[in-house]
Amino acid sequence: MSPDKHLVDGAPNCWQCRHFSVSWDPHFPYLCRLMGFKSRIVPSIEVLRADGQRCRGFLPKPVPGAAQQAPSRSVAR
């Protein structure tokens, strides 16, 4: 069984989630755009505290430069 690189101690790593953002509010610096809340701690921990289960909304951020490019076609001369 290979460990999931997006999970930290069984909880999703918010820093690698596309819904995670940093808020302008210094009292609540972390933001989950999917669930629509700001928090003093990373949202996955907040969800675990409130619900008792891991966050189910985790989606990994796209890897820069990993977008699929159309295969180049060689032109016959």
Image (cartoon, helix red, strand yellow):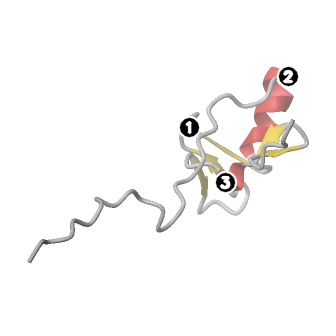
In the rendered image, which residue does mark 1 sit on? 36
In the rendered image, which residue does mark 2 sit on? 52
Residue 61, x across and y down, in percent: 56, 53
In the rendered image, which residue does mark 3 sit on? 16
Q: CA distance from mark 3 to mark 1?
A: 17 Å
3 and 1 marks in contact (CB < 8 Å): no
| Quadrant, the N terminus | top right
| Quadrant, the C terminus | bottom left
How many numbered badges does the structure rendering display?
Answer: 3
> Residue shown at 73%/43% (left/top)?
43
Quadrant of res 72: bottom left
Circle 3: residue type = Gln
Neighbour class for label 1 at 10 Å: few (<14), some, many (≥20)? few
Question: Which is nearer the N-term, disc 3 or disc 2?
Answer: 3
Front of the two marks 2 and 1: 2
Drawn side of residue 35 relative to residue 70, left or right: right
The vertical placement of 36 against 27, above or below, is above
Question: Which is nearer the N-term, disc 2 or disc 1?
Answer: 1
The vertical placement of 17 against 34, above or below, is below
Front of the two marks 3 and 1: 3
